[in-house]
Image: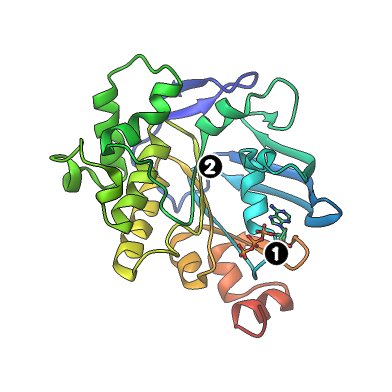
């Protein structure tokens, strides 16, 4: 079972999908598309005329040197940049057949469909159960909350570790478990897209590896867009890779194997081989 979004609303309709989705096959469609996207902080341009289509139910990695605009681009997709007063966005980000910056888009409803996981695990100082149920309560979910909590924790590969301590504080978990709790919280409202901003960079290698395995599983059901500084990680887990370079320019965007093995652009090769950045 998976979701799709109707053209004229950000309300989910459910459709049947092949549960044995083969990621080697071409993606069924485009989940998110940026068209002529420019982003400014005051007078400083952070994204420079980016156009790209991100396939659904795939992992797309955004890589590039510090300050090249990866996080800014990611935050545009679910309008998290709205919170930054000096940030100005021009151009379109299409999701579910409409521009998320167009009229009549409710950013809160949008963020239910496009969830986000941050670099530092940030569970609320609440029980494990309440952390996962948080978004459901806000949206007035009238289904079986406990069942959805269980399903989300299973989806985040955390259920077996916490099923006997659902009333303990989320803050008592290890860093890696906290990040998986945040992933469970993000998937509970049944999103279509999960944005991840360096989700493993604050974790030890074992915890990071578990999250990488989880991302692979998540892509069977969700579109995952991940910012990472770790090029090996991008090469390991992503299907598509977008390389941003200084000034917010999208320099190359292609299948991950092509980017890492035979990039078109010399600048991309130099970045990947560590000659700069
Ligand atoms: N809140 C903000 N206010 C002003 N300028 C900002 C803000 N956030 C980012 N910038 C600027 O926008 C540019 C892009 O920043 P962004 O964080 O998107 O890059 P990044 O590639 O994600 O960097 P990093 O890899 O270091 O996280 C940088 O020049 C940065 O200084």
Kindly identify which residue carries mark 2.
56
- The quadrant of the picture occupied by the C terminus is bottom right
Q: Residues within 10 Å of mark 1 (few under 14, many from 20)?
A: many
Q: Nearer the viewer, mark 2 or mark 1?
A: 1
Estimate the x, y position of residue 185 in percent, counting from the top left: 38, 38
Query: Residue 186: in sight, yes or no?
Result: yes
Q: Residue 68 has which mark? A: 1
Between 272 and 204, the one lying in front of the other is 204
Q: Residue at x 34, y 29 (%)?
A: 133
- Sequence order check: which comes first, mark 2 or mark 1? 2
Q: Tell me: 53 left or right of 155.
A: right
User: Quick check: marks 2 and 1 in contact, CB under 8 Å?
Assistant: no
Relative side of 192 to 267, left or right: left
Q: Would the CB of label 1 be found within 8 Å of ligand 1?
A: yes
Q: Position of residue 203 (x, y in %)?
A: 37, 64
Q: Residue at x 57, y 28 (%)?
A: 108
- Say whether residue 186 is left or right of residue 155: right
Q: Quadrant of the N terminus?
A: top left
Relative to 42, is 30 above or below? above
Between 143 and 26, the one lying in front of the other is: 143
């Amino acid at each position: 079972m998976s979701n799709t979004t109707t053209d004229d609303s950000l309300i989910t309709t459910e459709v049947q999908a092949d549960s044995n989705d083969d990621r080697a096959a071409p993606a069924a469609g485009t989940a998110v598309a940026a068209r002529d996207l420019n982003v400014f902080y005051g007078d400083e341009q952070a994204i420079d005329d980016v156009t790209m289509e991100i396939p659904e139910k795939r992992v797309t990695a955004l890589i590039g040197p510090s300050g090249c605009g990866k996080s800014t681009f990611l935050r545009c997709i679910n309008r998290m940049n709205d919170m930054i007063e000096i940030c100005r966005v021009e151009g379109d980000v299409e999701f579910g057949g409409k521009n998320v910056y167009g009229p009549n888009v409710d950013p809160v409803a949008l963020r239910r469909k496009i969830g986000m996981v941050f670099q530092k695990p940030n569970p609320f100082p609440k029980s494990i159960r309440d952390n996962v149920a948080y978004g459901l309560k806000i949206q007035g979910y009238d289904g079986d909350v406990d069942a959805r909590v269980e399903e989300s924790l299973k989806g985040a590969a955390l259920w077996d570790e916490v099923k006997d301590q659902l009333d303990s504080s989320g803050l008592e978990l290890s860093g890696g478990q906290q990040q998986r709790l945040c992933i469970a919280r993000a998937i509970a409202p049944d999103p279509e897209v999960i944005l991840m901003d360096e989700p493993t960079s604050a974790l030890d290698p074992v915890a990071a590896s578990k999250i990488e395995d989880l991302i692979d599983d998540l892509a069977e059901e969700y579109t995952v867009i991940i910012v990472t500084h770790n090029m090996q990680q991008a090469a390991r887990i992503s299907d598509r890779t977008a390389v941003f370079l200084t000034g917010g320019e999208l320099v190359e965007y292609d299948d991950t194997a092509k980017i890492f093995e035979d990039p078109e652009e010399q600048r991309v090769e130099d970045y990947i081989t560590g000659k700069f950045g």
